[in-house]
């Protein structure tokens, strides 16, 4: 949960780097909250809760994705490849699961800083 809160504290921070663990824990909690909101919406027969959650977490999701791509040595603009049907999502997934590289133009290696 601390990774999710940490990502929300960096709401619109598109600089720096995010480790794999930070990124995937954010995605995990995002999915858990979204499923809960969808269940509540299903019970009530609305779409309001899931819509509010998706809109509220849109910018933090883009920001942490950009920081994750920075960690692999890529620009955050690579997220736009996700607009290409199927292939874009596969390419982004591969980028997201790659390991951190050493120090790059986006900052020092977060693994080295935490160790």
Image: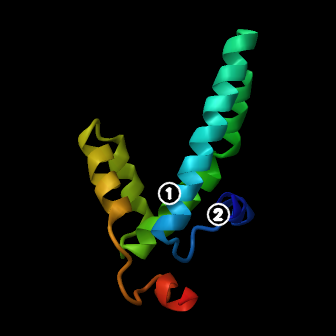
- Relative to 90, 28 lies left or right: right
Q: Position of residue 105 (x, y in %)?
A: 43, 86
For image coordinates 64% across by 68% down, the residue present is 13
How many numbered marks, from 0 up? 2
Rendering quarter of residue 11: bottom right
Mark 2 or mark 1, which is nearer the start of the sequence?
2
Residue that mark 1 sits on: 24
Instruction: Answer above or below: position of 61 versus 106.
Output: above
The answer to whether 56 appears left or right of 90 in the picture is right
Helix, strand or loop status at disc 2: helix
80 relative to 52 in the view: left or right: left
Q: Determine if residue 91 is in view.
A: yes
**Percent coordinates x, y for residue 61 in the rendering:** 57, 52
Image quadrant of residue 70? bottom left
Camera-side residue: 26 or 76?
26
Looking at the rendered image, the quarter that the N terminus falls into is bottom right
Q: Secondary structure at mark 1?
A: helix
* Residue 34 percent location from the top left of the image: 63, 34
**Residue occupied by mark 2:** 3
- Crowd band around label 2 with a 10 angstrom C-alpha radius: few (<14), some (14–19), many (20+): some
* Residue 81 point in image, percent of width and height: 33, 50
Which residue is at a point 32% across and 44% down the rendered structure image? 89
Residue 12: which quarter of the image? bottom right
Q: Residues within 10 Å of mark 1 (few under 14, many from 20)?
A: some
Left of 2 or right of it: where is 28?
Answer: left
Q: Which mark is residue 71?
A: none
Tell me if label 1 and label 2 are in contact, CB under 8 Å.
Answer: no
How far separated are the C-alphas under marks 1 and 2? 9 Å
Rendered residue at 72%/33% (across/down): 52
Residue most extreme to the top? 45
**Any part of residue 47 in sight:** no
């Amino acid at each position: 949960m601390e990774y999710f809160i940490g990502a929300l504290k960096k709401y619109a921070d598109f600089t720096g780097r995010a480790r794999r663990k930070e990124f995937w824990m954010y995605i995990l909690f995002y999915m858990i909250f979204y499923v809960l909101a969808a269940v509540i919406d299903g019970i009530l027969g609305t779409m309001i809760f899931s819509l509010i959650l998706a809109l509220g977490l849109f910018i933090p999701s883009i920001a942490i994705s950009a920081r994750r791509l920075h960690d692999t040595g890529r620009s955050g603009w690579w997220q736009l490849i996700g607009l290409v049907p199927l292939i874009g999502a596969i390419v982004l997934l591969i980028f997201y699961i790659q390991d951190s590289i050493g120090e790059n133009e986006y900052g020092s290696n977060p693994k080295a800083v935490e160790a």
